[in-house]
Amino acid sequence: MIRFENHLAGLVLTNVNQALSSDITYFDICGKFHYITFIIDCYSRMILGYSVSKRLTTEQTTLPALQMAIKARGGKIPPGTIFHSDGGGQYYAKEFVSITTKYQMVNSMCEYPWENGKAERINGTIKNNYLKHLKIKTFDELIKNVDHSVSLYNEGRPHKSLKYLSPLAFEKKHLLLVQQTTPKMTESFDAITKKERASSPFLLEQTTPQIQDVISAINEEIIETKRSTLFRLHHHDLKPASRQPPTASRLFKPSDFCSLNNQSASIA
């Protein structure tokens, strides 16, 4: 017989997926026992997985319930999640442990029933509050009503420990709070790239020849325009207020581009 250490004892839960808890209970139909296995999230009380079976084998109880629970979490269980249970053989069977090992879960077992209180409580809640008053006469009816009961519980059962929210409502609210408190990027990749480009001496080196070409073209255009204006004024005897030749101070210089770049950088 294998017994895992109790990793849930004394643990303060602060998030979903920290610990899952499970137990198997029976249900009497016309004097014949059938079995229901539940797996819950210990923090939110959400039923993540369950199975209804005629026998107590691992293949019919804990294995399908665990597979359902993993699927309910989108196929992703955070490594280190505790899986807590009683000392039943279905929880240390080779097939079961192979799955918990695959998802890097930490197997945990209690020594006394009250050390698995959350799972024990869910057994009583579903059986006594949802199933007991129904006239269930067949195994198929039991499956159908367990499905319905789990939905009613997850979506509508308020818990004092959850501030009177249902497990589903609590998880949605918790997820929203986590998203709101997650740090967000203050700058996009493009913004960071632009800053790097503005301060990169290597990039300045690469673009300097291009800047010089632009300056030369602009200056040639200015000189040509002024020459044309002087030619027209001379041949038409026009007397402008000022006939100043193009001087260096009126031409674009590389320093003008540098000052523009500095101004752009300071504005950014």
Image: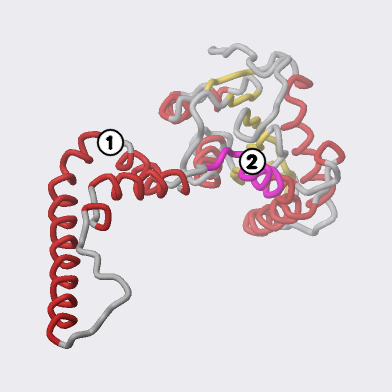
- 158 relative position to 25: left or right: right
Crowding around mark 2 (Cα neighbors within 10 Å: few <14, some 14 to 19, many 20+) is few
Q: Position of residue 175 (x, y in %)?
A: 64, 45
Q: Nearer the viewer, mark 1 or mark 2?
A: 1
Q: Give SS at disc 1.
A: loop
Q: Which residues are magenta?
A: 172-184
Question: Can the viewer see residue 37 in this picture?
Answer: no
Residue 69 disc label: none
Residue 200 disc label: 1
Residue in view at x 27 percent, y 57 percent: 250
Residue 178 disc label: 2
Question: Can the viewer see residue 253 in this picture?
Answer: yes
Q: Give SS at disc 2.
A: helix
Residue in view at x 41 percent, y 28 percent: 102
Q: Position of residue 164 (x, y in %)?
A: 85, 45
- Above or below: residue 232 compared with residue 264: below
- 90 relative position to 132: left or right: left
The amino acid type found where label 1 is placed reads Ser
Q: Does label 1 or label 2 sit earlier along the sequence?
A: 2
Numbered-mark total: 2
Q: Position of residue 167 (x, y in %)?
A: 73, 46
Q: Along the line of sight, which residue is nearer the eye, 81 or 236? A: 236
Crowding around mark 1 (Cα neighbors within 10 Å: few <14, some 14 to 19, many 20+) is few
Residue in view at x 55 percent, y 47 percent: 72
Residue in view at x 12 percent, y 85 percent: 235
Disc 1 vs disc 2: Cβ atoms closer than 8 Å?
no
Q: Position of residue 74 (x, y in %)?
A: 49, 46
- The N terminus, quarter of image: top right
The amino acid type found where label 2 is placed reads Val
Q: Main secondary structure of the magenta part?
A: helix
Q: Along the line of sight, which residue is nearer the eye, 215 or 137? A: 215
